[in-house]
Amino acid sequence: MRKPKLRELREALLALVRGPYTTKYPFEPHVPPEGFRGKPQYDSEGCIGCKACAEVCPALAIKVADETGGAKPIRRLTVHYDKCIFCGQCELNCTTQEGIKLTREFELAGFDRSKFREPVELDLVICQVCGCVVGARKHLLWVARRLGPKAYANPTLIVTAEGSISLAEGATPVKQESLSRNDMMRVVCPDCRRTIVLREIWGE
């Protein structure tokens, strides 16, 4: 029984000499340590709009909305801090490892939940046949760069990488019956490309 008491006495004396271990927050700013999981923040340069962060978010705090009705189709990813549990899965599973990062910011309290949002917007690539969403333009460019010369096996990636892509203006789909071999070199979704290939092979 004596040894624990002596150890406690030693800690008490050291505390008198060294001072308190705790900080004086909120009277003085607190600096979190490295690796602290705070507010997640998008990087507009690193994010490619692949939706991986939204897919792995256990709290469903990241919402994805594709807006194709306007003159310029966009994909909007929004982090809802009021739902975030700061688990770090979005940062861990980010495709580029640079799209979203957990910062060391922790003072997020407030009264208006609508202010706890952080969106990032990216251009969408739309199928020029049916008008469906193919993906974010930055995502296709990232895939083309990663594939290198192999990207030329996919006409959609070729057109995107060469910079001659044009976003569809509104909903102007083409009838499926008009699909032909010439449509192979257009920006089309996987379903339309499958139809084009089958008709080219089987002649139906």
Image (cartoon, grey):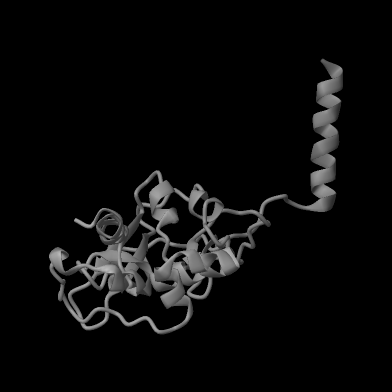
- Front position in the image: 204 or 171: 204
Q: Quadrant of residue 180?
A: bottom left
Q: Quadrant of the C terminus?
A: bottom left
Residue 179 shows up from this direction: yes
* Furthest residue toward top: 1
Pinpoint residue 32: horizontal percent, then vertical percent. 63, 58
- Front position in the image: 12 or 77: 77
Pinpoint residue 160: horizontal percent, then vertical percent. 43, 76
Pinpoint residue 116: horizontal percent, then vertical percent. 35, 64
Q: Quadrant of residue 168?
A: bottom left
Does residue 122 lie above or below 95 as drawn?
A: below
Does residue 181 lie above or below 16 as drawn?
A: below
Q: Quadrant of residue 76?
A: bottom left
Does residue 86 lie above or below 26 as drawn?
A: above
- Side of 57 relative to 202 (left or right): right
- Side of 24 relative to 41 (left or right): right
Residue occupying image coordinates x 52% and y 57%: 94
- Front position in the image: 190 or 194: 194
Q: Quadrant of the N terminus?
A: top right
Residue occupying image coordinates x 48% and y 64%: 153
Residue occupying image coordinates x 23% and y 65%: 132
How many labels were placed on the picture?
0
Pinpoint residue 181: horizontal percent, then vertical percent. 29, 69
Residue 116 shows up from this direction: no
